[in-house]
Image (spheres, rainbow, N blue to C red):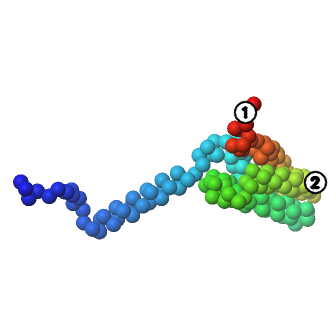
């Protein structure tokens, strides 16, 4: 009885299967790390829903413009530029906020940056929407009239979505923000 080891391992796998198992565990660990670093409260917020609407409807907007001969109306080049640019930038911003870049990049004033971004996007999308709506008429007797009219409609919807995001970004920027100095002052 005295020869019984104090530590007993019950592992019966070979070294090759153990390395395969560790690879599986590292993939599970990676998935847990990614989902752990995602800001799930952001997904359920109104600004997140607005950004997802901007991404989806913005994609539809620029796809409608790009699928028609937009060179018939030169203003549609501006519309396509604004739509594609803000679609790409909004997608990047969405994933930056989703994965918590504001916690890692503390030198950036995120509430102000997001508010200015949405304000500029609203103004430029408004000009693009107006240019798109004004240039629907040359397409009246063509197959692409429906494309351009739908693009003008979705341009208006995306403009409203950016305006709402600018409003909520303003409220976030103007809000308390959790400043310890303002929350500890006795009233």
Q: Are marks 1 and 2 in contact (CB under 8 Å)?
A: no
The residue tagged with tag 2: helix, strand or loop? helix
Q: Which mark is residue 37?
A: none
Residue 60 shows in the view: no
Q: Is residue 163 visible?
A: yes
Q: Is residue 71 above or below residue 167?
A: below
Image coordinates of residue 67 in percent, x first then y, are: 78, 61
> Quick check: 178 left or right of 6?
right
Answer left or right for 128 relative to 64: right
Frontmost residue, 82 versus 23: 23
Q: Residue furthest bottom?
A: 16
* Residue at image location 82% in from the left, 60% down from the top: 82
Residue placed farthest to the top in the image? 187
Residue at 17% of width from left, 56% of height from top?
Answer: 6
> Whole-percent x and y of residue 24?
39, 60
Circle on res. 134: 2
Q: Quadrant of the N terminus?
A: bottom left
Residue at numbered disc 1:
186
Quadrant where the C terminus sits is top right
Q: Secondary structure at mark 1?
A: loop
Q: Nearer the viewer, residue 80 or 97?
A: 97
Upstream in the sequence, badge 1 or badge 2? 2
Viewer-side label of 1, 2: 1
Task: Give x and y (percent) for residue 4.
Answer: 11, 56
* Residue 153 in the image: above or below residue 63: above
Name, please, the residue furthest toward the front.
186
Which class describes the residues within 10 Å of circle 1: few (<14), some (14-19), or many (20+)? Answer: few
């Amino acid at each position: 009885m005295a020869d019984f080891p104090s530590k007993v391992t019950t592992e019966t796998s070979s070294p090759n299967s153990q390395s395969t198992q560790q690879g599986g565990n590292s993939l599970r660990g990676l998935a847990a790390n990614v989902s752990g670093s995602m800001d799930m409260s952001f997904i359920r917020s109104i600004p997140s829903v607005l950004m997802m609407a901007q991404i989806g409807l913005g994609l539809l907007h620029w796809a409608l413009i790009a699928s028609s001969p937009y060179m018939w109306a030169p203003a549609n080049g501006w519309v396509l530029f604004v739509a594609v640019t803000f679609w790409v930038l909004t997608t990047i911003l969405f994933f930056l906020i989703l994965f918590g870049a504001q916690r890692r990049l503390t030198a950036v004033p995120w509430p102000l940056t997001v508010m200015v971004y949405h304000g500029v996007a609203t103004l430029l999308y408004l000009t693009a929407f107006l240019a798109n709506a004004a240039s629907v008429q040359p397409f009246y007797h063509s197959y692409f009239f429906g494309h351009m009219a739908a693009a003008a409609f979705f341009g208006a919807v995306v403009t409203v979505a950016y305006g709402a995001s600018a409003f909520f970004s303003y409220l976030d920027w103007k809000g308390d923000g959790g400043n310890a100095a303002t929350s500890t002052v006795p009233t």
